[in-house]
Image (cartoon, rainbow, N blue to C red):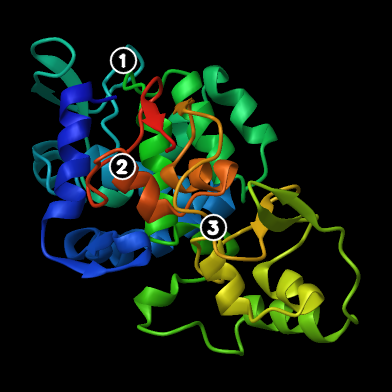
Amino acid sequence: MRANQLLRGVIVLLFSLTSLPLLYGQRMNAAYQAYIRKYANEAILQMKRHKIPASITIAQGLLESNAGASTLASVHNNHFGIKCHKSWQGNRAYKDDDEMGECFRSYDSPLDSYTDHSYFLQQPRYKSLFQLSLDDYQGWAKGLQRCGYATDKGYANKLIVLVELYSLYELDREASPSWMKGKASPPSSTREKKREKQTTSKPPKKRTQYNCYGLEYVLAEEGDSFATIARDVNIDEEKLAAFNDAPVDFPLKKEDVIYLQRKNKHGDSTPDHVVSVGESMHSISQLYGIRVEYLYKINGLDIESYVPLEGDVLRLW
């Protein structure tokens, strides 16, 4: 919904303000964390009512409103950059965007903006998104870009970065990211009970191991987690997650590549990679068995600000 240049600026701001350390050397922005704490419950409520992943709702709110700091959000309570369109009968605000003096919706409260965002996505153009599961944040991100929610060709990738950097996928499980508590979720939580059941109720099973780029790996199965795979291959869960540049609660999909040893510092024979919609530096690093930090280094990129855009060419060695 916002111009490409502004969206790039938002991503730079995301990592350049007061921040806290996180995975891959990237850092969480304190203002973004505060925004997530403030609106996480509302995003979960909207998910229950309208079947839109809470992770996507929060990620869009962060990106479109610069964590509530944009004029549209702070003055007009518009957190999703939604323009008036012909059907809008409410209050209006005008600002330059893709064109000069464009009309945007103005709300009485931020929660009104969250509710309207849910109804806005009920339009026929977004119908295909509701065939996706609530935990498929990558599919939703790519679908929003494909259906024309924003003109920025890096929109999906930026949403995915936010979801993964702030562990927003936990919201889709109606849980809180561990950083919101300052520690891992308590064992009494539904997620931890399920995880404990996965690792204790079944004996280890034999998994087919493969080799590529000189690395041993297995393929995730439906319902897998780092905990279940770690149990079966007899590797410490945290070590296994670290081998794959991910937190232990990172959601796995069927046929995800899970490396059983530390990844390489560079690629093999493939010289470069052209970024597609929905790809992140993490997903690209998994594709070629390269550690995320070295993928940044090889390309001379800033680990705290670069987000891959569709069409970008990344060197692999």
Residue at image mark 3: 263
The answer to whether residue 78 of the structure is visible from this angle is: no
Residue 308 percent location from the top left of the image: 36, 34
- Dot in front, 1 or 3: 3
Residue under the point 16% across and 29% down: 6
Q: Helix, strand, or loop for circle 2?
A: helix
* Crowd rating for badge 2 (residues with CA inside 10 Å; few <14, some 14–19, many 20+): many
Q: Helix, strand, or loop for circle 3?
A: loop
Residue under the point 36% across and 24% down: 312
Residue 129 percent location from the top left of the image: 60, 31
The answer to whether residue 160 of the structure is visible from this angle is: yes
The quarter in which the C terminus is drawn is top left
Residue 29 percent location from the top left of the image: 21, 61
* Crowd rating for badge 3 (residues with CA inside 10 Å; few <14, some 14–19, many 20+): many
User: Amino acid under label 2?
Assistant: Ser
Q: Earlier in the sequence, mark 1 or mark 2?
A: 1
Q: Helix, strand, or loop for circle 1?
A: loop
User: Amino acid under label 3?
Assistant: Lys
* 168, 94: nearer the viewer: 168
Using the rendered view, name the quadrant where residue 120 is placed: top left
Q: Which of marks 2 and 3 is nearer the N terminus?
A: 2
Residue at image mark 2: 113
